[in-house]
Amino acid sequence: MATGAWQRGDRSPVGEIIMDQDATVVFNGFLQLMAKEKMQVVEAVNEYFDSTNREPIRAEHEQRFRELDIVEKGIVCKCCGR
């Protein structure tokens, strides 16, 4: 463990990996999901990292995200509440 300020990748006294601010916000949102939703995210992340051709996965996700029309449907972000 680093002395002074936490560094990305350090472990806290109880063993958790210390994440940067963006990762912490996203992980907080992940923790707000129901168990089934968490599993869907884990499966999608695993598919992404297991693939040798990630661009089609990224493009498909970006298209689905655009189709959500978050503002029009009033969808609230699980990470930040906006």
Image (spheres, grey):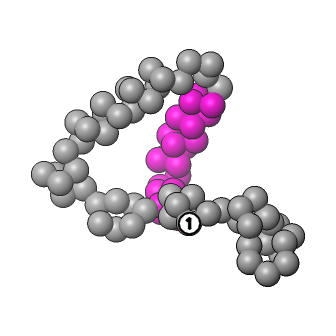
The percent position of residue 42, horizontal first and vertical second, equals: 58, 41
Report the magenta residues as a range.
28-49
In the picture, measured across the screen, residue 9 lies left or right of residue 39, that is right
Residue 21 covered by magenta stretch:
no
Q: Please state which amino acid type lies under the numbered disc 1.
A: Gln
In the picture, measured across the screen, residue 50 lies left or right of residue 44, that is right
The percent position of residue 35, horizontal first and vertical second, equals: 53, 52
Residue 40 covered by magenta stretch:
yes
Give the residue drawn at x 61%, y 22%.
51
The answer to whether residue 24 is above or below residue 45 is below
Q: Quadrant of residue 61?
A: top left
The percent position of residue 50, horizontal first and vertical second, equals: 65, 26
The residue singled out by tag 1 in the image is 21
Give the residue drawn at x 47%, y 57%.
33
Q: Quadrant of residue 21?
A: bottom right
The answer to whether residue 60 is above or below residue 65 is above
Residue 43 in view here: no
